[in-house]
Amino acid sequence: MSGNENQLRSAISNLVYNAVNHTPEGTHITVRWQRVPHGAEFSVEDNGPGIAPEHIPRLTERFYRVDKARSRPNRR
C-alpha cells in the first residue's frame, strides 16, 4: 500500500472512531486488515442501521455530517 502515511493513518483512525462512536449500543463492529493478491485491504463493518443512500456520494466531503439524530452520544 502506498500513500501519505499521515493521511492513511488519519483515514483509518476516522473509520474506526466513527464505527465505535456513531453506531447504536450493542452493534457488532468488525475491523479487518488483510493481504490480498495485489496489496492490502482494510475494512470496518458493523451491523448498525447503515447510511442512507442519499448520503453516500457526500461522505468524502470535509466536515459533511449525516443527520445527527441518527447518532448516539460519544461513549467516552
Image (cartoon, rainbow, N blue to C red):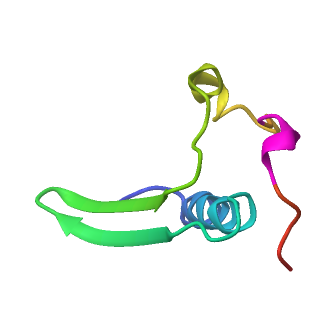
Who is closer to the viewer here, 60 or 51? Answer: 51
Who is closer to the viewer here, 75 or 34? Answer: 75
Residue at horizontal 86 percent and vertical 80 percent from the top: 76
Who is closer to the viewer here, 16 or 49? Answer: 49
User: How many marks are shown on the rendered structure?
Assistant: 0
Residue at horizontal 58 percent and vertical 28 percent from the top: 56
Where's residue 38, x and y in %?
15, 56
57 versus 73 height, above or below: above
Q: Is residue 31 left or right of residue 60?
A: left
Picture quarter containing residue 26? bottom right
Reply yes or no: does residue 70 show up in magenta. yes
- For the N terminus, the image quarter is bottom left
Q: Is residue 24 left or right of residue 69?
A: left
Residue at horizontal 44 percent and vertical 70 percent from the top: 30
Spot the residue most to the left: 37
Residue at horizontal 77 percent and vertical 37 percent from the top: 62
Spot the residue most to the top: 54
Where's residue 10, x and y in %?
65, 62
Q: Is residue 34 left or right of residue 28?
A: left
Picture quarter containing residue 49? top right
Q: Give the range drawn in magenta.
A: 66-71
Picture quarter containing residue 54? top right
40 versus 70 height, above or below: below
Reply yes or no: does residue 33 show up in magenta. no
Spot the residue most to the front: 26
Spot the residue most to the bottom: 76
